[in-house]
Image (cartoon, rainbow, N blue to C red):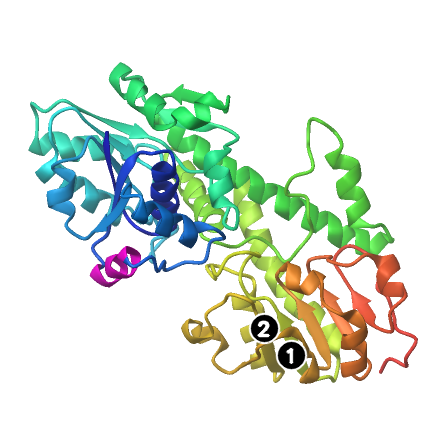
Amino acid sequence: MKISIIGSGYVGLVTGACMANANQHVTCLDIDEKKIKDLKNGKIPIYEPGLEDLIKEKIKSNVLSFSSEISQTIRNTDVIFIAVGTPSNTENNEADLSQVFSCAEEIARNIKNNTVVIVKSTVPVGTCDKVEEIINLKNPSLNFDVVSNPEFLREGSAIFDFENPDRIIVGTHNKDSITTLNLIYKKQIDNEFPIIFTTRRSSELIKYASNSMLAMRIIFINEIADLCEKVGADVNDIALGIGLDKRIGPEFLNAGPGFGGSCFPKDARALVESGISYNAPQNLLKAVIDGNEKRKENLSKKIITIAKNRKNIGILGVTYKANTDDMREAPSLSIIPDLINKGFNISIFDPQANKNSIKEFKNANWENDIYSVANNSDCLVILTEWSDFKDMDLKKISDIMDKPIIIDFRNLFSLDEMKKMNIEYHSIGREAINSSKEVE
C-alpha cells in the first residue's frame, strides 16, 4: 500500500514517520520546496523529541520519502492523508479551511479509482462532506471514500502517542475503507489499542470535544487555585484529592498560566462557532475561552505586584509547554509585552524557542542559560515547565541574586523545599514563602 500525506508540518511529519516505522511506504508532500529539500536531508522544521532521528532512520530504510510534486505523487497513491493546518480565521473565530479545500481540489484533479482520502487535519463538523463534494464534482463516476481520522498527539510526546494511542477514531462505514484503516493501524490494533469506527460527523466532533474538555479542566483547576490562595488551601492537594476519584482522574489538573498551543485555543473557538452555526450555543466553553484570556492578564498583574519597584525581570521559558518550540498562543506572548510596556527590563531563557522569530519579544534580552538570566534579574518568573528549571541549582540562584524572588507559575518546587532556601517564593494556589532576608 502506497501512502501519501499532504502537509509536512507537525501532524504530517509525525504521522508519516510513525507509519514508516510500521513498514508502510510513505511520501510526505508539501508545496514548500525548501522545507522538502531540508527534510530529504533529515533536517526537520520543528522540535519534537525523537522525531529527527526517526525520520533519518526511515529515509535510510527507503520507507519514507519527501516530495513537492504533489500531483504526480498522488496519482500513484492508494491512500491520501490531508494533514494541513486549519488555523483560526483572521476575520472571525471559525477554522480557516482554505488549505484543506485546496488539497481537495488537487486530489480531485489527480485521484485514481478506489483511493481512500483520509482527513487528519482538525476540522469542523461537515468538512469531510465538503471534501467529498469537491472530489465528486470533478469525478462523478469515480469510486473513492473520504474518511475522518483525527489526530490526538501531544506535543513533546507525539511519537509515543501515535504508537500507543488511548484510542483511534475513524469516521467511515465503508467496508473497504475499514479494511484499509485496519491495515494502516495494524501495529496498534495488534497491541490491543482500541479503534472506534463511527460516522464522519461524529469523528470530527470527537476531536473538538476532546480538546475543549481538556481546556475546561485547565481553567477549572486554575480558578480553584485562585480560591486556594484566598482561603489558605493548597491546589496540589485539591488536584490530588479530586483526581483520585475514578470518575474524574488526575490528568490536566495542574494549575498554571493557562492553555496555549496550536490546538486548544483554536479548537475551542471553532467549536463555539459551530454551536452558533447550528443554533446549539456552547456557553460553558465560551466562558472557558474568556477565562483563559483573563488569566494571562491577571498573571501579569501578579508579577507586577510582587516585583514592586524591582525593574529587572527574568523569564524562564516562553514556549506554551515544555519539550516543544511551539509559541502559538503561549501565555508569554501576552505577559512579556505587557511587562515591557510597563517599563520592566526583561531577560529570557528558553531551551528551544527561536528568539529570531518572536517579534513580541524584540525589546527583551535573550540569555544562554538560567544563571545568566538570574545574574541580570531581581525576580525570576517560571512560565514553562522545562526540566532544566526543575533541576536548577537553587543555592547558586540564591548566591547570584540579591534578595532573590522566584514566581513559579508551574509549581515546580515543593513548599517544604523552598522553605529551606533563602528565596522568596510565590507559586500558584499555594502559600507564599518569604526569605529570611529583608524583603523590600
User: Are the two marked residues, 1 and 2, in contact with CB atoms closer than 8 angstroms?
Assistant: yes
Instruction: Tell me if residue 35 is in the magenta stretch.
Output: yes
Q: Which residue is mark 1?
A: 373
Quadrant of res 139: top left
Instruction: Tell me if residue 351 is in the magenta stretch.
Output: no
Q: Which residue is mark 2?
A: 349
Q: Which of the two residues, 149 or 209, is positioned nearer the viewer here?
A: 149
Q: Is residue 343 visible?
A: yes
Magenta stretch, main secondary structure class = helix
Residue 159 in the image: state x and y as whole percent.
47, 43
Q: Which residues are magenta?
A: 33-40
Marks 1/2: CA–CA distance = 7 Å
Disc 1 crowd, CA 10 A, few/some/many (<14, 14-19, 20+): many
Quadrant of res 366: bottom right
Residue 426 in the image: state x and y as whole percent.
78, 65
Q: Is residue 312 above or below residue 145?
A: below
Is 400 on the left-hand or right-hand side of 183? right
Question: Label 1's element?
Answer: helix
Query: The N terminus lies in which quarter of the figure?
Result: top left
- Residue at 69% from the left image edge and 46% from the top image edge: 221
Q: Is residue 26 above or below residue 433?
A: above
Q: Which of the two residues, 213 or 271, is positioned nearer the viewer here?
A: 213
Is 270 on the left-hand or right-hand side of 25? right
Q: Which of the two residues, 353 or 50, is positioned nearer the viewer here?
A: 50
